[in-house]
Image (spheres, grey):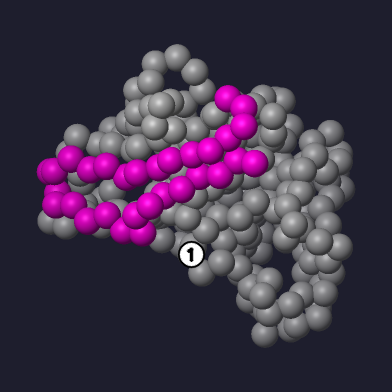
Amino acid sequence: AQSVAQPEDQVNVAEGNPLTVKCTYSVSGNPYLFWYVQYPNRGLQFLLKYITGDNLVKGSYGFEAEFNKSQTSFHLKKPSALVSDSALYFCAVRDSNTDKLIFGTGTRLQVFP
Amino acid sequence: EPEVTQTPSHQVTQMGQEVILRCVPISNHLYFYWYRQILGQKVEFLVSFYNNEISEKSEIFDDQFSVERPDGSNFTLKIRSTKLEDSAMYFCASSEARSNTGELFFGEGSRLTVL
């Protein structure tokens, strides 16, 4: 069975500082990993994905994520946070044997001016 | 930019009533999904649909739930007899041709309130 864990309910960071939102996963086959962002009262927006290839993937709004197979992690990062990055971030995983995308519990990112 | 659209944006219903939530997926997409989110928390998979049949469903998706693609554009979720615990935000999503490497595109959601 596939699962994904986001160990932090909330991450606080000052504007201009680097941010990291953590995610670890468990799958039986090859992992396909995704990050989504949700702004208040909105749907989920796709940020980036890892399927294969380079372990560092770049996505929308300056975000990137690093796939680490040995640590089964896919942490989301950004070198310099903006107040407008404040939102709920979801990590998601799908293994190569299924269609469904399974989401983590979400991490609320708060960027302070 | 093409998008997934959902109606209604908010529906209030009495317990025991039937509810139909509607979605128009992105036109060239072939995979369709329903997810729900309770109180802005975890996003839970309900069902996936491909080639006019359910491909996977979760344990949440019991006999009270059904999905249908009645024409070439709409994709609906029906809850036959709503319960208080069905109150949630329901998201429709679609993705491109058969590939589990593709990302899902989500609609803005339909908020269901069961009284």
Front residue of this view, candidates B28 and B86: B86
Query: What subunit carries mark 1?
Result: B
Q: Is residue B24 visible?
A: no
Residue at the outermost top position: A53
Classify residue B42 as left or right of residue B100: left
Q: Is residue B68 visible?
A: yes
Residue B3 location, quadrant: top right
Q: Position of residue A68 (x, y in %)?
A: 38, 27
The residue at the point 27 percent across, 54 percent down is A11
Q: Which residues are magenta?
A: A1-30
The residue at the point 48 percent across, 36 percent down is A34
> Tag count in the figure?
1
Q: Position of residue B56 (x, y in %)?
A: 77, 43
Q: Mark 1: which amino acid? A: Gly
Check disc 1 and report the residue beneath it.
B40
Residue A26 inside the magenta-drawn segment: yes
Residue B86 location, quadrant: bottom right
Front residue of this view, candidates B109 and B80: B80
Residue B29 location, quadrant: top right
Q: Position of residue B43 (x, y in %)?
A: 55, 55
Classify residue A62 as left or right of residue A44: left
How would you rate the neighbour count of disc 1 (Cα within 10 Å): few for under 14, some for 14-19, many for 20 or more?
some
Residue A27 inside the magenta-drawn segment: yes
Residue at the outermost front position: A70
Classify residue A29 as left or right of residue A11: right
The residue at the point 82 percent across, 74 percent down is B81
The residue at the point 69 percent across, 35 percent down is A99
